[in-house]
Amino acid sequence: MSADDDRRAVARRLFRPEDKRPYVFNGKPLKDLKDLKDYLVAFTGREALWVASWLEYLGDTESAKRIRRKPREFKEIVLKRYKELKPYL
């Protein structure tokens, strides 16, 4: 499987999750990576490890590892991943 194939597979899991529960933050269900990206301004930073676990649950172990290594940078990591994977839909 090529790197592009891997990115396509991860993009599908993050942008169109099937049979996965949303991440609920402040009563708002975030169902995919786009919802998470659009709502990042509401996060304070304390949620980084929860976000990492949810991304891992959706199938993105790479982003989860990055966030766990650098939790203070989780918003930047999410934005970068969004920009990286969006073209693969």
Image (spheres, rainbow, N blue to C red):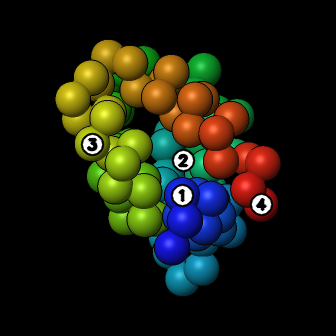
Placement of 43 over or under 19, stated as above or below: above
Amino acid type of the residue tagged 1 in the rendering: Ala
Amino acid type of the residue tagged 2 in the rendering: Gly
Helix, strand or loop status at disc 4: loop
Q: Nearer the viewer, mark 3 or mark 1?
A: 1
List the residue tagged with mark 1.
3
66, 19: nearer the viewer: 66
Task: Return the x and y of residue 23 as percentages of the image width and height.
Answer: 48, 55
Whether residue 56 is visible to the viewer of this picture, yes or no, is yes
Q: Along the polypeptide, which appears first: circle 2 or circle 3?
A: 2
Q: How many marks?
A: 4
Task: Determine crowd level at label 3: few under 14, some 14-19, many 20+ residues with C-alpha closer than 10 A.
Answer: some
Residue at far bottom of view? 19
List the residue tagged with mark 3.
65
Q: Are marks 3 and 1 in contact (CB under 8 Å)?
A: no
Q: Is residue 50 left or right of residue 38?
A: left
Task: Give residue 52's quadrant in the image.
Answer: top left
Q: Along the polypeptide, which appears first: circle 3 or circle 1?
A: 1
Q: Is residue 50 left or right of residue 13?
A: left
Q: Along the polypeptide, which appears first: circle 4 or circle 2?
A: 2
Task: Return the x and y of residue 29 as percentages of the image width and height.
Answer: 59, 54
Amino acid type of the residue tagged 4 in the rendering: Leu
For image coordinates 51% across by 21% down, the residue present is 76
Placement of 41 over or under 24, stated as above or below: above
Task: Give residue 70's quadrant in the image.
Answer: top left
Helix, strand or loop status at disc 2: loop
List the residue tagged with mark 2.
27
Task: Determine crowd level at label 1: few under 14, some 14-19, many 20+ residues with C-alpha closer than 10 A.
Answer: few
Which mark, by number, is residue 89? Answer: 4
Task: Determine crowd level at label 2: few under 14, some 14-19, many 20+ residues with C-alpha closer than 10 A.
Answer: few
